Amino acid sequence: MYIKVYVNAGAKKESVKEEKPDEYLVAVNVPAERGLANARALELLRAYFGISKRVIKIISGHHSPHKIVLVEESK
């Protein structure tokens, strides 16, 4: 399944919040530099959905706060 994600980098408190079905707001406490915010956002989404590293990845929006993320069903 594809989800839309907005990443708020440099936040004081980390969180994952479902705004609408298939749309999420992810707050991370790391800066948006060298892919740190992307990596932390994926870690938080993995914990939120309870899935492994292999089944979630950013499809588009690597340099933008608005991203499309692929969440594959684990087998």
Image (cartoon, rainbow, N blue to C red):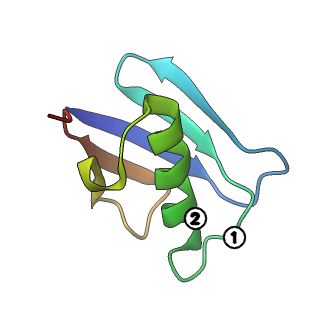
Does 60 appear above or below 62? above
Instruction: Count residues near mark 1 (Cα–Cα under 10 Å), then give few for <14, some for 14-19, many for 20+.
Output: some
Q: Give x and y (percent) for residue 27.
A: 66, 45
Q: Nearer the viewer, residue 64 or 72?
A: 72
Q: Which residue is mark 2?
A: 37
Q: Who's the residue at 69% across and 70% down the image?
A: 31
Q: Which residue is mark 1?
A: 31
Q: Give x and y (percent) for residue 21.
A: 37, 16
Q: Residue pushed farthest top?
A: 21
Q: Nearer the viewer, residue 6 or 2?
A: 2
Q: Who's the residue at 51% across and 32% down the image?
A: 48
Q: Residue pushed farthest right?
A: 12
Q: Give x and y (percent) for residue 68.
A: 30, 47
Q: Nearer the viewer, residue 43 or 3?
A: 43
Splitting the image into 4 quarters, where does residue 9 fall? bottom right
| SS class, disc 1 | loop
Q: Nearer the viewer, residue 63 or 18?
A: 18
Side of 64 relative to 8 (left or right): left
Q: Who's the residue at 52% across and 21% down the image?
A: 19
Report the Cα–Cα distance between label 1 and label 2: 6 Å
> Which badge, 1 or 2, comes first in the chain's sequence?
1
